[in-house]
Image: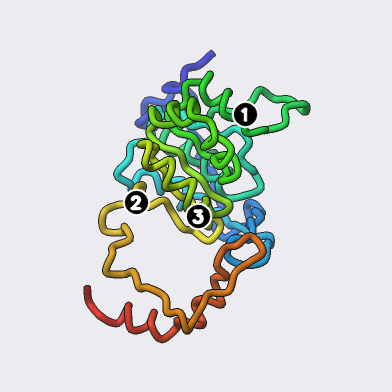
Amino acid sequence: MPSFEELFPCNVEDAAYPVHTPLYDTKQSTIILHTSGSTSLPKPVVWRAHHLRQWAIAPWLGDVDLSGVVMACHGLPMFHGIGILQIVSTASCGLIMATFNPSLNTPPTPALVFEEARITKCELICTIPVFIEYWAKDRAKIDHMKTLKGVIFGGGPLSKETGDQLASHGVCLYTSYGRPTILRVNDLLPSDLKLVKEMIRVTSPSKPFEYTSKGTVRRQAALSIYATEIQELYGSPY
C-alpha cells in the first residue's frame, strides 16, 4: 500500500504516480448546510466550492496550530457548519477528528460523548451547549475539562451561569457561533483579524434586541435597529 507521502508528495516531480490536476468550477454548488436558527429562522444555505476552500485554509491563518490535535467531534450535527468545518480542517491542516464507530444504534448522549472523548484522549472537545450544561453538573467531568486545550461550543448560546462556573474552575471555553454565516473563534484568527475592544459598543435600553425562539439575537433586526451606530463605528478610526 502506498504511503501518504507517495500519494501526496510536496513536489509534483517526486510523485510516484501520475498527477492529474482536475479543474473545478469554484462557483459550483458543492454542499447544502442548514442553519441552527441562531440569528434568524432555520434555513438551508447553499455553499459553493470556493466557500469550502476558504474554510479549508482558515486554520492556517490563525495563531493556534491544529496539526495533529485530536478533537472530539462525537455527536456534532453534520448538516451544520460546525460539523463540516472539522472535516475540511482534517484535510487542510491535519486536525484529527475523533468520532463514534459507524453504527445506527449509538445515540450521542451527553454521557456517551464525554466518555468517548476521554477514551480517545482528545485535546479539544467541540460540542453543543446543552451537553456542556450537563457536564458542568459533574465535578469529575469539570476536572477533566480543565486538562484540555479547550471546549468549543456552537449551534446556540451557553448560559452565563454555566460559562462563569466552568471558567472559575479553569476550563477554557471557546464559542464557535454562527458558522454558516462565516464567523470564527477569535483565538483561531490572525492578530489583525481579531475582535478588538474598540469595535464593541454597548446596546441602549431604549433599543432592545429581538430574540429568536432559541433565545439568541435576531441578526437582521439588530443590524437595522443599530444601523446608525454601526455606520459611525466603522467610519471612525480606533
Comparing marks 3 and 2, which lies closer to the viewer?
3
In the picture, measured across the screen, residue 23 lies left or right of residue 212, that is: left
Near mark 1 (Cα within 10 A), the count class, few <14, some 14-19 or many ≥20, is few
Specify the quadrant that holds the C terminus. bottom left
- Is residue 126 positioned above or below 213 on the image? above
Is the Cβ of the residue at disc 2 closer than 8 Å to that at disc 1?
no
Is the Cβ of the residue at disc 3 closer than 8 Å to that at disc 2?
no
Q: Earlier in the sequence, mark 2 or mark 1?
A: 1
Near mark 3 (Cα within 10 A), the count class, few <14, some 14-19 or many ≥20, is many
Residue at the spot of label 2: 189
Q: Given the image, on which type of amino acid does mark 3 rest?
A: Tyr
Instruction: Give residue 127's position: percent from left, percent from top.
Output: 55, 40
Q: Given the image, on which type of amino acid does mark 2 rest?
A: Leu
Is residue 94 something one can see in this rendering?
yes
Comparing marks 2 and 1, which lies closer to the viewer?
1
Instruction: Give residue 181's position: percent from left, percent from top.
Output: 53, 61
Badge 3 element = loop
Q: Nearer the viewer, residue 169 or 29?
A: 169
Cα–Cα span, label 3 and label 2: 14 Å
Residue at the spot of label 3: 177
Badge 2 element = loop
Comparing marks 1 and 3, which lies closer to the viewer?
1
Q: Nearer the viewer, residue 78 or 232?
A: 232
Applied colour scheme: rainbow
Q: Which mark, by number, is residue 111?
A: 1
Residue displayed at 54% across by 70% down: 219
Question: Can you tell which quarter of the image residue 39 is in?
Answer: bottom right
Which residue extends farthest right?
104
Residue displayed at 38% across by 40% down: 172
Q: Nearer the viewer, residue 17 or 147?
A: 147
Near mark 2 (Cα within 10 A), the count class, few <14, some 14-19 or many ≥20, is some
Q: Given the image, on which type of amino acid does mark 1 rest?
A: Ala
